[in-house]
């Protein structure tokens, strides 16, 4: 299922982030910047929600591009987020669509999100799907994704990919307006 907004939206108040990994103790080892920033998983879970809420208001829409939380206790932190929440499923999102909606307040659960010719997904998509900014190339002008965290993806060394894993965006969501401006500038 694809996320689409049916009415005009304020792109300044729609935000995107990926790979919160709430409750995932090993993320502190896999991503040393998280350990340096937060110290413990408990501190990380609380601080991440607080940092995201610094950007949001009650009318905001937050699109999380996968890997929200690793257990139900950590998932309860998501209910503290301001605004509406939408989930594009990641490889660690295993609760089931109904659980995300009914128990954790997501407005919807999706596989991908498309907006303004840009594909939003958990995984980076194959380069053949991404155009080169001319009439040649793939179906999308760019791919906003998560999954790879702070690591470079050497197989896709192009500015047409934008990694919004929370480590890469200083733990704060990026506005849809900023993303559209980024791709407009290419």
Image (spheres, rainbow, N blue to C red):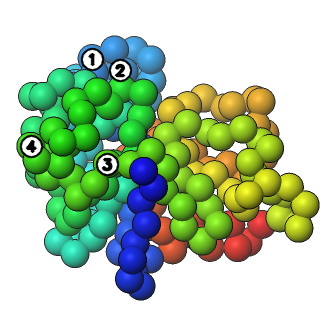
Left or right: 48 in relation to 80: right
Where residue 89 appears, as percent x and y from the top left, is: 39, 39
Between the residue at mark 4 and the residue at mark 2, the CA separation in whole angstroms equals: 27 Å
Between the residue at mark 1 and the residue at mark 4, the CA separation in whole angstroms equals: 23 Å
Residue at the outermost bottom position: 8
- Marks 2 and 1 in Cβ contact (< 8 Å): yes
Q: Which residue corresponds to mark 4?
A: 103
- Element on which disc 1 rests: loop
Decide which of tag 2 and tag 3 comes sooner along the chain. Answer: 2
Between the residue at mark 2 and the residue at mark 3, the CA separation in whole angstroms equals: 27 Å
Q: Which of marks 1 and 3 is in front?
A: 3
Where residue 3 appears, as percent x and y from the top left, is: 42, 59
Q: Residue at x 44, y 45 (%)?
A: 111
Instruction: Tell me where residue 68 sits by quadrant.
Output: top left
Q: Which residue corresponds to mark 1?
A: 25
Decide which of tag 3 and tag 4 comes sooner along the chain. Answer: 4
Q: Which residue corresponds to mark 2?
A: 28
Local crowd at mark 1 within 10 Å, few (<14), some, or many (≥20)?
Answer: some
């Amino acid at each position: 299922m694809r996320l689409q907004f049916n009415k005009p939206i304020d792109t300044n108040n729609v935000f995107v982030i990926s790979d919160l990994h709430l409750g995932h103790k090993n993320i502190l080892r896999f991503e040393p910047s998280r350990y340096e920033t937060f110290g413990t998983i408990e501190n990380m879970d609380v601080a991440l929600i607080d940092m995201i809420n610094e950007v949001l208001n009650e009318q905001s829409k937050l699109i999380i591009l996968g890997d929200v939380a690793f257990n139900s206790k950590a998932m309860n932190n998501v209910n503290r987020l301001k605004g509406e929440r939408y989930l594009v499923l990641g490889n660690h999102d295993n609760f089931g669509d109904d659980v995300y909606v009914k128990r954790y307040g997501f407005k919807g659960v999706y596989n991908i999100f498309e907006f303004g010719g840009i594909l939003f997904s958990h995984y980076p998509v194959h380069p053949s799907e991404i155009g080169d900014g001319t009439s040649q190339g793939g179906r999308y002008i760019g791919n906003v994704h998560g999954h790879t965290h702070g690591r470079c993806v050497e197989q896709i060394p192009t500015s047409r990919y934008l990694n919004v894993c929370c480590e890469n965006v200083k733990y704060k969501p990026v506005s849809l307006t900023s993303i559209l401006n980024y791709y407009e500038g290419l």
